[in-house]
Image: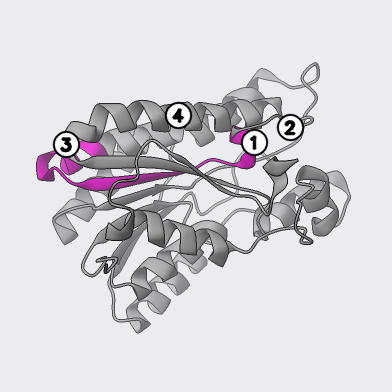
Amino acid sequence: MENNLKDKVAFITGAAHGQGRAVAIALAKEGCNIAALDVAKKIEYPNYNFGCPEELVMLKKEIKDLGQECISFCADVRDEKAVNDAVIETINKFGKIDILFNNAGICAYAKVDEMTNAEWDSMLDINLKGAFIVTRSVVKYMKERKSGVIINNSSTMGLRGGNRLSHYTASKWGLTGFTKAIAIELAPYNIRAVSIHPTGVNTPMNDGLASLEGKTPIEIAEASAGNLLPTPWIEPEDVADLVVYLAGNKARYITGAQYVLDAGLLTV
C-alpha cells in the first residue's frame, strides 16, 4: 500500500529547528506542501535560545529545493489571533490542511516547592493549551473535508513521571489525554488523532537544558532518559520517520493511540 502523501498539506508548529524541522523536510520529501509556524524568538521562559526567523527562511529554501511549497509564520502558539491568521492564510494558499503536527513545546527543570506560578503557567500554556488553540483553529477545516490527521508530540513523560519536571510531565500527560478525547470526538469526521512519545531527542532543546543545568547535552539526555538501547538519545529524523508513517495511508486505521519511540526506556 502506498503511503499517499503527495499533494497533502501539513501544518507544523515549532518548525524552525529540531523535530519540527525534520518532520517538515521528511513530509516535503513525500510530496507534501508545508505551513511552518514557530515563535522564532527568545521568550520569557525558559531562558535558552529558541528558533529564529533565519531558520524558517532556510527551511523554506530547502523545501523549495525539494520541489514543494512552504509558507512560514513567526507566531506564538499561545496567541490565538496569530494562530488563526496563520491557519486562514494556509487555507487561502493551499485550500486545505491534511496533517497537523502539534510539536511546539518547552522544557525546564524546577522543584515543585520552588516553582513559580509563571513557570507552571508557561509550561502548560505552550505545551498543552497551545496544542488546543492550534487544533481548534485547524479542525473546522478538516471537518468540512471529512479528512485529516492530528499528530501530537507528547513525550515518554506523557506516560511516566519525571524528576523536577512536574509541570512538564503534567503538560505531556494532558496532551496524551487530549489526543484520546479528540480521537473519539473526530472519528465520525474521518479525522484521526494520535500522540507520539519520544525519549530524549538530539535537538537544540537538549543544549538549552544543558546550559541551564551546567551539564553536557549527553548528561542531560542520560539523566532524563535511561534508555534500554545503548544510545543517549534518538535523532529528529527518527521522529520524522514515525510521523511520516502515521500521517499517511499506511496508518489509515490508527487513531487514539500512543506511539512510543523510546529506545526501550519504558520497558524497564
Q: Is residue 242 above or below residue 63?
A: above
Q: CA distance from mark 2 to mark 4?
A: 20 Å
Judging by the rendered image, the residue that carries numbered circle 3 is 189
**Front of the two marks 2 and 3:** 3
Residue 267, quarter of the rendered image: top right
Give the residues drawn in magenta, as a range. 139-158
Instruction: Please name the amino acid that badge 4 sits on.
Output: Lys
Q: Position of residue 239 (x, y in %)?
A: 53, 58
Judging by the rendered image, the residue that carries numbered circle 4 is 129
Q: Please, what secondary structure does the residue beneath circle 3 have?
A: helix
Mark 3 and mark 1 lie on one chain; the one further toward the N terminus is 1
Q: Position of residue 223 (x, y in %)?
A: 83, 45
Q: CA distance from mark 2 to mark 3?
A: 36 Å
Q: Tell me if 176 is positioned left or right of 65 in this view.
A: right
Q: Please, what secondary structure does the residue beneath circle 1 have?
A: helix
Question: Dot 2, how many residues are within 10 Å of its Cα: few (below 14), some (14-19), or many (20+)?
Answer: some
Q: Tell me if 42 is positioned left or right of 258 in this view.
A: right
Question: Dot 4, how many residues are within 10 Å of its Cα: few (below 14), some (14-19), or many (20+)?
Answer: some
Instruction: Please name the amino acid that badge 1 sits on.
Output: Met
Question: Dot 1, how many residues are within 10 Å of its Cα: few (below 14), some (14-19), or many (20+)?
Answer: many
Q: Nearer the viewer, residue 220 or 79?
A: 220
Judging by the rendered image, the residue that carries numbered circle 1 is 157
Q: Is residue 244 magenta?
A: no
Instruction: Please name the amino acid that badge 3 sits on.
Output: Tyr
Q: CA distance from mark 1 to mark 2?
A: 6 Å
What numbered label is drawn on residue 162?
A: 2
